[in-house]
Structures are given as structure tokens and as C-alpha cells.
Image (cartoon, rainbow, N blue to C red):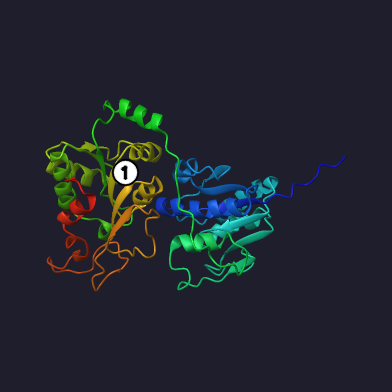
Amino acid sequence: MAKQQSTHSKILVLGPSWVGDMVLAQSLFKTLKLNDPDCIIDVAAPAWTLPLIERMPEVNKGIALPFKHGEFALFERFKFGKSLRTERYTQAIILTNSLKSAILPFAANIPQRTSFLGEMRYGLVNDVRKLDKIKLPRTVDRFVTLGLKRNTSLPDNILNPSLIANKNNALATLQKLGIPSPSHKVLGLCPGAEYGEAKRWPAEYYAEVAREALSKGWQVWLFGSEKDIPVTNAINQLSENQCLDLGGKTNLSEAIDLMSLCDNVISNDSGLMHVAAALDKKLVAIYGSSNPHHTPPMNDKAAVEYLAVECSPCFKRECPLKPVNENLKCLKRIEPSRIIDLLKINN
């Protein structure tokens, strides 16, 4: 007797490369599951995003893409796509706009390939959705709408990302680093931003907040990748080396679990900011060159600090203003005392 074909949707999502965008993509996965609880969702994305995917119960499995960042690799992408044909996906949802990202689902013979048109992807994308930036101002809006049937309005309340943390892994990481479990309130600081300097609140401002928290008996943990070691080290030195400097000492999975132990988090607009929001932390998110209306923290507990000076959002990696008193004014005019008040450290 022939095996009966499953009628359930099996969806391959081509995920984004940025940590923050991958966190926001969980709202799409939740929406897909809400509308079809039996659907199967696999996510193909760069390997460094897989620790996030592993914390999303809606996702069946993550598939690491073996391509270098920015690499076109037409033959390799087509070959990789062909290797997925046995998965028999019914739909692909492509969250990125590049031409190369649409090659894989085409090669995988996925019948419905949904996305915005992007880089002239006629044929590669056969379920083209119109991108109305007025109706869909936020990245999360654009992700979620791709998971809805054509011409369906966004739901009034988009489901927030909610990463699953592992406390035992967090405690094991502390033990590995030779650090005792926290016995006081913990303030997490995320002073880095992969995109560039124009997103980074000054190190000396972070240090002022850190010193205030330390004086009230809090512990202060500094989060960051290897690229952030100079800034986390600078903040720690300005705080008389009383912080726990985790810069470059943890991988993304460990950082997620350690952040789950924090009581409050202060962050630039970065991937770790979205991680903190998805862990339901009390959060102060600081915006400079970017726009909080485009990529806000998806968390009702989050406070956004954004001055909206006349030249912002410029979306530049480095501030284009040359006079010293004008450079990075969108960030430098956000005083540490303002952030301290938002955190209610003194309470």
C-alpha cells in the first residue's frame, strides 16, 4: 500500500544573519504555529544564530548555512538547496532581500516561495508580497506578514519573542569561570553594537551607571563578544575593576543563559538588547543613529531612551558630525543620571 502523503505544512524559513533580527523572527514562528499548530518549521541560517533557534520551541530544527558572509557561491547554494529536496517542504519564507538567499529554496523545489521582491528575484520568489513601509514600519511587522495569507492584515497584537533560558547552564558557566552564583541583584550592561560606533553609548557613561549600582550593593556584569573586549575592559577599569567582565569570555548560548540571571539590563540597540527583551528582562534600550520605531525591543517592561535629535536617525556606522561638541550628540546628550532614574537603582 502506498504511504499516505502528509497534509501538514512543512515550512523552511531562510533566516537573517543579525542576532537581533533572528530574535524578532520568533514572532513569525509563533504566528505560524498559532495559525497552524501542526505545521513544522525548520530554519536555515548562519551557524552563529543557531543558539537562538535552539531556544525557540516553535522551531523543529536549525540548519546551518555553510556560506561565508556576503559570499554569492551560486553553485554551492544550488547544490545545498538540492540536498534539501528530500525534506519535501511545502513553503519557503525568505526573510532577507538578497538575490542569493532565494537561490536555495528554488533549488530545493519548494513549491511556494514567499518573500518581498528584494533584489529582482522574479521567478525565484513566486509568492511576492508588496512591502508597504508605511503599513509595515517595524522589522517584526515585515517578518510576521510573510507568514500570513496574502492580503491578510497584521494581528492587533503581535506575539513577542520569548527565548527559553537554561539556568543550570548559566550556573555551570559561572563555575567554569570561577565565579560564585549571584547573591545580590545583578545589572547587565551590553555596551557593544556590531553595527558601529554610532550605536554605542559612551563607555564612561556606562561606567557611571555601574559605579552607582555597585555602591547600592548590586553586582554588575558586562556582556560582549571578542570585538567588545576594549569597551567592557574600559568600563571595568573606570569602575575600579569591581564588575564581572564577560567580554569575549562567553559564546552566545552562555550569554543568553547568564543574562537570564540579571534583574535589569542596559543595552545599546544591538542583538543582545533583543535577547534581553526576549528573556522578559527589565530593560533600558538606548538608541542613537538607529530608529526605535523600526526595531524596538519587544517587551512591555522595556524603556526606550531616544532623543530624536535633528540629524537622527541617520543609520550611519560612524557619526558624520566633525565638531567635538556635536559628534555623537544623539547619544552623549543622554545623561547617565537619566538611565539611573529609569533603573530605579536607589529603590
Q: Position of residue 171 (x, y in %)?
A: 35, 29
Q: Position of residue 132 (x, y in %)?
A: 50, 73
| Identity of the residue furthest to the front in this view | 347
Q: Check disc 1 and report the residue beneath it.
A: 225
The quarter of the picture where the N terminus appears is top right
User: In the displayed structure, does residue 239 sit left or right of residue 264?
Assistant: left
Quarter occupied by residue 99: bottom right
The quarter of the picture where the C terminus appears is top left
Quarter occupied by residue 229: top left
Q: Is residue 150 above or below residue 32?
A: below
Mark 1 crowd level (few <14, some 14–19, many ≥20, 10 Å Cα): some
Frontmost residue, 264 versus 66? 264
Q: Is residue 140 above or below residue 50?
A: below
Frontmost residue, 54 versus 111? 54
Q: Position of residue 299 (x, y in %)?
A: 38, 53
Frontmost residue, 195 versus 171? 171
